[in-house]
Amino acid sequence: MKLLVIEDDKNIAEALGKFLKSNNYVVDVASDGESGFNLADNNDYDLIITDYLLPKINGQEIISRLRQNGNTTPILAISVCDKTQNKINLLNRGADDYLAKPFFFTELQARVGAMLRRRKPQPKKILAYNDLELDLSSHEATRSGQIIYLTTKEFSLLKLLIENPEIIFSKQAINERAWDAASSLISNVTEAYILKLRTKIDFKKPFLIKTVPGRGYKLDDK
């Protein structure tokens, strides 16, 4: 299970992360609302724990934005503000539960466990080409049953190729459709990630990632 903790108090964040990891969770920690929202919006988590009072974007706004984007990940809101109206606002924005600070870690663990048990398992979303499969939920690929772990950029590139088999994509098209604007400023980013993907994907024949000289790249098993 992978959890995201968004907490600007360094001591609390470190203690939370250490406690949750000791309970066999994988934990990412963000120290402000903006970075926390970006992590939550671009990665798959089983549960998000967010403080209410945060720099840049507060917890209530994080929850609102995630729900507006269709993110259904369970969210536990924590706050020093224990007023009833504050709880109502957070729950109305889309939080699944609320815990007032200070709290016992044992209560936090109980609430996290209960929220995870209530969450209905999501069906796997799989893209496939030849013997290559891409799991949109776990961001993992498999080829002939062998698990291949991908970085975020590798995943985005492979997703573009596998959704459009045998279509040639130029470097510019890949930069525009697979990554963010900053990536397009790096001239050799496409070649670098094609090479990384080939190392991971094309360990057996047929080699699937093809270069079309002067035009770009495509996924093709011929």
Image (tube, rainbow, N blue to C red):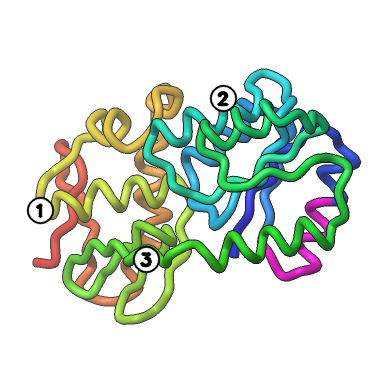
Residue 61 marker: 2
Left or right of 126, for residue 6: right
Q: Which secondary structure is most common in the magenta stretch?
A: helix
Q: Amino acid at mark 2?
A: Glu
Mark 1–mark 3 distance (CA, rounded to whole Å): 19 Å
Q: Nearer the viewer, residue 222 or 71?
A: 71
Label 3 SS? strand
The residue at 32%/66% (across/down) is: 123
Q: Which numbered mark, 1 or 3, is in the foreground of this view?
A: 3
**Labels 1 and 3 touching (C-beta < 8 A):** no
Mark 3–mark 2 distance (CA, rounded to whole Å): 33 Å
Residue 141 marker: 3
Q: Residues within 10 Å of mark 1 (few under 14, many from 20)?
A: some
Relative height, residue 82 to residue 102 (above, below): above
Relative height, residue 35 to residue 117 (above, below): above
Mark 1–mark 2 distance (CA, rounded to whole Å): 42 Å
Q: Amino acid at mark 1?
A: Glu
Mark 1 highlights which residue?
166
User: Nearer the N terminus, badge 3 or badge 2?
Assistant: 2
